[in-house]
Amino acid sequence: QVRLVESGGGSVQAGGSLRLSCAASGVHWKPSCMGWFRQAPGKEREGVAQIADARETSYADAVKGRFVISEDNAKNTYLEMNSLKPEDTAMYYCVSSPLCASLGNWHPNYWGRGTQVTVSS
């Protein structure tokens, strides 16, 4: 059974940083795709970042150069978020699937419950 548990969210001022963590269990398939989605109030859910086989990364244009995704040997996934902006405020979800797709067309099989990130101006 796949289980994804996010942590590390919180409130921060604009320009600050946060590091989200995703503790993964039951993710045994290879290749694998791990990533992060977010959903702001009144907006659609959007892909933020993904990492394929712990190597190849891709990012949404809105976060390129500010966010960094990484993965350890246990499939735990991290999202380092720097230079945060108020528009980054959202619920952030850890996701996983056997295969990656482009962020705009990716429909991950597994989702965590989310962790809230709030950025104040």
Image (cartoon, rainbow, N blue to C red):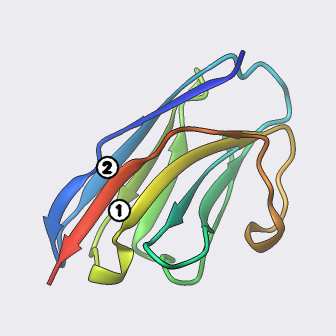
Report x, y in % for residue 42. Answer: 49, 78
Dot 1: within a 10 Å radius of its alpha carbon, few (fewer than 14), some, or many (20 or more) residues? many
In this rendering, position of residue 19 left or right of residue 92: left
Screen quadrant of the C terminus: bottom left
Residue matched to label 1: 81
Which residue is painted at 81% across and 68% down in the image?
A: 102
Q: Residue furthest front?
A: 42
Quarter of the image holding residue 3? top right
Report x, y in % for residue 72. Answer: 54, 30
Residue matched to label 2: 19
Disc 1/disc 2 C-alpha distance (Å): 6 Å
Screen quadrant of the N terminus: top right
Dot 2: within a 10 Å radius of its alpha carbon, few (fewer than 14), some, or many (20 or more) residues? some
Above or below: residue 95 compared with residue 44:
above
Which residue is painted at 68% across and 46% down in the image?
A: 55
Do labels 1 and 2 touch, CB within 8 Å? yes
In this rendering, position of residue 115 left or right of residue 75: left
Give the structural element (helix, strand or loop) at label 2.
Answer: strand
